Image (tube, grey):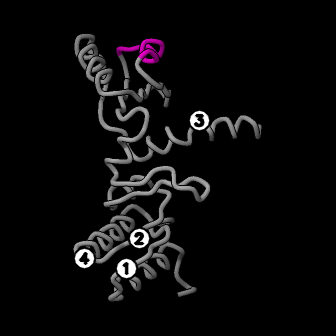
Amino acid sequence: MNRLSGGLRRRAMVAMVMASDAEVVFLDEPTTGLDPLARRSVWSAIRKAVSEHRTVVLTTHYLDEAEALSDRIALLEHGRILLEGTPREVAGRVRYPYRVAVESGFTEEELRSYGEVSRIGDRLLLFTHEPAARELTRKGLERGARISLGPVSLEDVFVQMVGKDFESDSAEEA
């Protein structure tokens, strides 16, 4: 086992755990360091275990992974549970449950009146409520804007929950 690369070692450990007949399986960061194909293979093994009525307790920093694989989620920060529930329940408990990505058609100033705005490269991300998201969609169609709308992801939830604290902590450290 020591001669294997980190990724192969991790895959072998996941395979050994999944090969057991344990009803409850604990996986700590099972896809860290894996390439995308190996990651999908681990996801498939987890889904198979769940389909066999086994309980899989998964810890991960990859929130897309938690969202894709989990029936229940607990978001933690510094060992403290921030939110828990189904992915949909967790997403519904944040201040702004909708995410609008805007590539053109609106200014940052306009969007600020609807909720919280972040800039990522050339795109603006607006976190807002459903009525505002619908209004922006309507206005966007009228203007020929390039926008996309959807519920927030778990990553968006985490950023909404701890992002401001993280930003202020980073500023204090600088």
Classify mark 4: helix, strand or loop.
loop
Circle 3/circle 4 CB separation < 8 Å: no
Mark 2 nearby-residue class (10 Å; few <14, some 14–19, many ≥20): some
Q: What residue type is labelled 2?
A: Val
The residue carrying mark 2 is 57
Q: How many marks?
A: 4
Mark 4 nearby-residue class (10 Å; few <14, some 14–19, many ≥20): few
62 part of magenta stretch: no
The residue carrying mark 4 is 53
The residue carrying mark 3 is 164
The vertical placement of 40 against 67, above or below, is: below
Res 26 quadrant in image: bottom left
Q: In this view, does 133 lie to the left or right of 59?
A: left
**Bounds of the magenta span?**
105-113
CA distance for labels 3 and 1: 36 Å
Q: Which residue occupies 49% across, 72% down?
A: 7
Mark 3 nearby-residue class (10 Å; few <14, some 14–19, many ≥20): few
Q: Which residue occupies 31% across, 74% down?
A: 45
- Dot placed on the residue nearer the N-terminal end, 2 or 3: 2
- Dot placed on the residue nearer the N-terminal end, 3 or 4: 4
Q: Which residue occupies 54% across, 74% down?
A: 6
What number is the disc on residue 24? 1
Classify mark 2: helix, strand or loop.
strand
- Dot placed on the residue nearer the N-terminal end, 3 or 1: 1
